[in-house]
Amino acid sequence: MLGVLSGLLPLGAPGTPPFIPSTLLYAGASTPADRATGIATLAAFTGQSEAVAAQFYDAYFADPRHPDTGLQGEFAAQRARGPFVVNSDAANVYNTDNVILTNATTIDVAPDTIIKNIFGFTRLKEVFSLESDGVPYALGETGRTVDEAYHTLTQQLSEELQLQGKAVDGRLDYVLGFYYSHERYTSLSKSAFFDILFGGALSVDHYRLTNRTYAGYGQITYKLTDTGLSAMVGARYTSEKVRKQKLAGDDDIVMPNPAFDLDQSVKYNRLSWNFGLQYQASNELFLYAATRRAYKSGGFVGTSPSIVGFGDVGGDQFRAEKVDDVEVGAKFFGNMAGMRTRLNVAGYYQWISNSQRTAYTLLASGGPAAVTVNVPKGRAFGFELDGSIEPASWLTLGGSANYINSKFGSEPASANGQNQVFDQVPDTPKWTGILYADIAMPLSGSLTGILHGDIYAQTKSFISPRSQNNVGTVISGYSVANFRAGIEHKASGWSLMANVKNAFNRTYFVGGLPAGEIYQINVQIPGEPRTFTVEARLKF
């Protein structure tokens, strides 16, 4: 889906976000006042005379591809059209060619010991466009043509070897393993920026990110008693080498800078762990408590200028993110009131360090840029609940509910030496949930009639981690219903299904691009409208 313009962040004091006055540059020409504003802004922004600016400006808005109502007018027009009718100058392109190979081999080497090997190979080739401004002016977009779109290639080779078994008269379960992965991501794209600035600029990003990972891990579970109480201990040591290379044609090579390092690498060595207690209270009820530490790897932003250093000094590198947590939960699978019942419940608390987030800032050159920074502290807590019941052999009712309360700490993050307050966690609604019903009715022999219905709902969320960017960055809560009906022949392995998604044609949004702090524009991506599909499957 293409993004649509959802808000225009008002201009603030000079040197503060938004950094580029897009509403003034693209003021339009439908009134003398709008035309005068646009010409004066263009002249001031580029250092050209107003006569030269007027000649280009008038020709630009005389082009029927550029509505003379300007950015404000196009925003109003988009709101009137709704999210499924757009006026965009980017090609709507998505092509993919994927190869995925996996193999899992298990060898029994003793009555209680097995060796397991897991091999994986992935090759993902994609061509896609990104309409990041949602308007028919080229403020910032990749993919006005297929040649200018993103061309990416992801290749990964992985190998994992495990030794699994039992010891101490069956009281000890263990897993020991080694993991290796080599991943290479190559991207070539051409992005158009601010065509109102005498045609604008075409930025070329051509880079490769390589990640080579070695890890050793082990986990043991020991039965402390004969009544179901066990202790679990696990650890994993990971060594990752991350490399960023700029390739031929990239702006950093075409326009070199002494501050650039075109081939950077960094190594991360981390120890993750988990400890827990488990209690099999009965054949139906399982209880557990655990505490863990995990990391999200650091690295480099491929599209950022190759400035050495972290985002807090305007560099292209970001630190690893660390999460510590505690979790308690219960799992029930049995019969209640004569009905087969499954119920899982868990509560958790997370301590987060160096959360990886995007910040917008002015670089030393004076140009605006997006950099990845690490927010020092954060926390999250919540619970997860899911379950199902079977009132009859042909009927299953179920659902889930999730609550999360997350926030960043009060300490600001630094973006190129400028402190920024991150005060709302994006893409994280407090409540999400789903209810569903499944009916499977025998028709004849192995033929079964299938009917499924579900409704998903969530509360509001944000697309920006900063409340300062507060125009068009709130996604309202929504609910959608989906249905599926068809027939299945289990003996032969075939099925035929008809599906309807978003059955009541609700308008809702699922994400966005909060670039308002750079050039005023925030974009949201609508969810799919009511969609009908027919699906045939054959298992063999």
Image: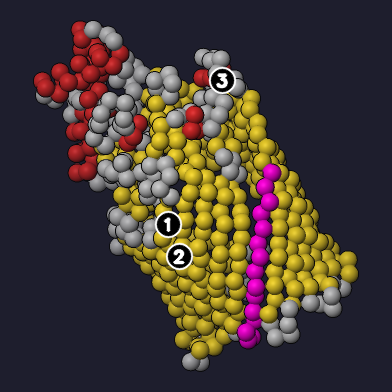
Q: 46 or 142: which is nearer to us?
A: 46
| C-beta proximity under 8 Å, tags 2 and 1 | yes
Amino acid carrying mark 1 in the image: Ser
CA–CA distance in space, label 2 to label 1: 8 Å
Instruction: Mark yes or no: residue 242 visible.
Output: yes
Amino acid carrying mark 3 in the image: Phe
| C-beta proximity under 8 Å, tags 3 and 2 | no
Residue lying farthest to the front in this orientation: 411
* Crowd around label 1: few <14 · some 14–19 · many ≥20 (10 Å): some
The x, y position of residue 142, in whole percent, is 43, 30
Which residue is disc 1 drawn over? 406
Q: Is residue 219 left or right of residue 404?
A: right
Residues shaded magenta: 269-283
Secondary element at tag 1: strand
Q: Is residue 280 left or right of residue 468?
A: right
Residue 435, magenta (yes or no): no
The x, y position of residue 194, in whole percent, is 34, 23
**Vertical order, 153 against 442 (above or below):** above
Which residue is disc 3 drawn over? 260
